[in-house]
Image: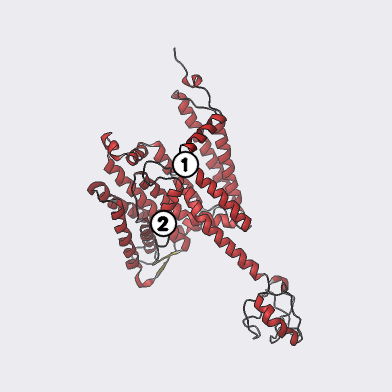
Amino acid sequence: MSVDVASVEPAEGLGSELRRVLDNIRSGDVGSLPVVVGLILITIFFQSKNDNFLTAGNFNNLIVQMAGVTLIAMGVVFVLLIGEIDLSIGFLSGVAGVIVAKLQIPDGSWQVNGIVAILVAVAVGAAIGVFQGSFVALIGVPSFVVTLAGLLAFQGVVQKVIGEQGVIVIEDKWINDMANYFFSDRAGWILAALASAFYAVTTLARIVGRRRAGVPIGNLVLPALRIVAFTAVAFFVVSVTNRDRGFPFAGLLIVILLVFWTYVATRTTFGRHVYAVGGNAEAARRAGINVARIRLIVFGISGGMAALGGVVFASRLNSVDLNAGGGTILLDAIAAAVIGGTSLFGGRGRVVAALLGALVIQALPTASASSATARRRSSSSRAPSFWLRSHSTRSRAAGSPSPGADSFSYRGEGHEPGGKGCRCHGCEPRHRRRRCPLAACAGRQGGPRLAQR
């Protein structure tokens, strides 16, 4: 007589799920909760300071600008899971950018199709990662030393290849579309529907698999709520991006690779071995896991993802220069993985940590940039203080009207007709019917009217 285990186990309710979460928090296993709370607080704070922070244009810019760091951070997560570090990812991404830039130069001896150039760059990055990993896995050199040497070497490669040219402009459409292509409104809705259907199918398949295996499936309300929440988020994101240029291809690339690497880390034998090596390498070796092979593959993943991130950076700028891979790319990628909840000591973390951490890191400069833009727009709509100090008295003395603080907007001083400070040509739209008030200008009171834009 067979017994249905699922029917014997009591169904878990929302209360038990909440108690489990609270128990994890008390034990210190907070997961991604702090970064989620931080994102909410950052959003509320900057939106209260600047109404432009949650606009569609700023949201699209955030997705595109965080794409490169997010892709690199996904590879960093795997390296951190085995308890190692990779300091070469920054300039390795720069090397990949230089590779695609060189391979797409028109009429060049190495010119290939843009897609082929991208694949070559990613393959070279993965090969470099495996090469560095061989020193760690086979010889036993600390990863910090090996990858630090790689950082210095790849920085020299970028400087040597670009040389006195300084900048290599990327003209290939396929490469530039990596960060500059936006889907149409209809395509965005289709992508949201497909993503929601895929999540629902995989969730139901997991429930069916557990049922067949006789494993308790718990309360079905929770999976249903997750499906509804995911669908709502997907359609909300598309609705916001469609108000601007549409959903960016860089965002789709992030989602696809996030799903793929999450599956690899949580649903494959290789992924379980990665966590085992990070938890205790010696115990994993005694259990029959080939620790050296796991380390080689992980460093290959890190190199390949760094190269792909470098291609996205080059695509966003439509060029590469001597600083390719420099700046804060290395720090941002590692910080994104750690802030998202990945442990520096190995054995704990998720791939989604790269996405959450990159959101926090990129939200701050994006908010600052949007605030600066809002201030510039606000100041350009009012008369600057130098006009009130210098020109009002002079204009009244010449018999011309003295405008109020909200009547005219000038960008510089000067009194030459049509010169710096004269707004006869290029006046603000609401002033296009007025005459230039500068006393020494041919367009002043009694002169020709202001030219319309």
Q: Secondary structure beneath disc 2?
A: helix
The location of residue 175, given as percent across then percent down, is 44, 58
Q: Residues within 10 Å of mark 2 (few under 14, many from 20)?
A: some
Q: Amino acid at mark 1?
A: Gly
Question: Residue at horizontal 53%, vertical 24%?
Answer: 11
The location of residue 18, given as percent across then percent down, is 54, 33
Q: In front: 295, or 210?
A: 295
Q: CA distance from mark 1 to mark 2?
A: 21 Å
**Which labelled disc corresponds to residue 331?**
2
Query: Which quadrant holds the C terminus?
Result: bottom right
Identify the residue under disc 1. 31
The location of residue 140, given as percent across then percent down, is 24, 48
Instruction: Tell me if residue 346 comes above or below residue 51 in the rendering.
Output: above
Pointer 1 with pointer 2, Cβ within 8 A? no
Q: In front: 303, or 16?
A: 16
One can see residue 289 in this view: no
Query: Which quadrant holds the N terminus?
Result: top left
